[in-house]
Amino acid sequence: MPMPQCGNRLASTLHLRLNQTFCELLTPEMSRIDDDNGISETGAVETGHLWQRPGFLIRRLNQIHVALFFESCKDFAITPVQYGLLTTLSERPNLDQTSLCAEVGVDRTTMADVLRRLEERGLVKREPSPTDGRLKIANITARGRKIMKEMYASMRESQVRFLSPLSAQDQTVFVRLMMQLVEGNNQFGRTSLKHFD
């Protein structure tokens, strides 16, 4: 649900005041920032203050996203990573753990824990690979598909709420830019996403 207009004005006013306060606290060299976009006179993104650092902002956005996801999906006791894994298995069945890591972008230890938890709830089933006995193949169960279907509207609500401070056009640009950053830096993660290899 979008914020009321008065809430947007208040947030905008607070943002401007915080930005002015931060600029006043910064050294004279660092305070030469374009207040509208955080770009220095040299054209580089400033990273002197915590709120100017992309990594900090991305971590904070992730915290907000997870909080919104849990609020919207509280009736299901499913995490964002678990939902992502169920989505992947619903679209691409018969994947082993290594392939799932590459699809979802988590390390093997995390994947093993997520699979175990989902299997304990009867949402995923693992069986030995018919071609390689050392591997276990994972599939979503009928119960897993049912909970995904029941959760979809709540999951979508969390995504819509997360992006609601942006206009429709900015939402599209924001998602496109995030994809570009993930693709451009994919090799630096603990696990590379196969989609971008």
Image (tube, rainbow, N blue to C red):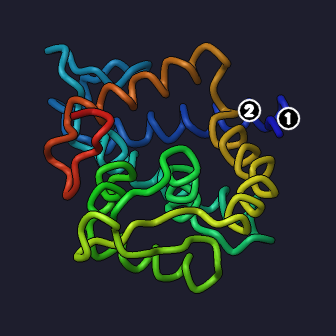
- Residue 86 image-quadrant placement: bottom right
Q: Residue furthest front?
A: 130
Q: Amino acid at mark 1?
A: Pro
**Residue denoted by label 1:** 4
Between 90 and 18, the residue placed more toward the observer is 90
Q: Is residue 32 left or right of residue 110?
A: left
Q: Which residue lies at the image location 71% right of the left edge and 38% below the top edge?
A: 160
Between 137 and 75, the residue placed more toward the observer is 137
Percent coordinates x, y for residue 103 in the rendering: 36, 48
Question: Considering only vertical position in the picture, is 14 above or below 129?
Answer: above
Question: Considering only vertical position in the picture, is 154 above or below 130?
Answer: above
- Residue 77 image-quadrant placement: bottom right
Q: Which residue lies at the image location 29% right of the left edge and 51% below the top edge?
A: 102
Quadrant for the C terminus in the image: top left
Q: Which residue lies at the image location 58% right of the left edge and 50% below the top edge?
A: 90
Question: Considering only vertical position in the picture, is 162 above or below 76?
Answer: above
Question: In the image, which disc is placed on residue 8?
Answer: 2
Q: Which residue lies at the image location 54% right of the left edge and 65% below the top edge?
A: 82
Question: Considering only vertical position in the picture, is 174 above or below 65?
Answer: above
Between 109 and 14, the residue placed more toward the observer is 109
Label 1 sits on a secondary structure element that is loop
Percent coordinates x, y for residue 94 in the rendering: 44, 57
Between 56 and 22, the residue placed more toward the observer is 56
Q: Residues within 10 Å of mark 2 (few under 14, many from 20)?
A: few
Quadrant for the N terminus in the image: top right
Percent coordinates x, y for residue 30 in the rendering: 20, 33
Q: Residues within 10 Å of mark 1 (few under 14, many from 20)?
A: few
- Residue 147 image-quadrant placement: bottom right
Q: Amino acid at mark 2?
A: Asn
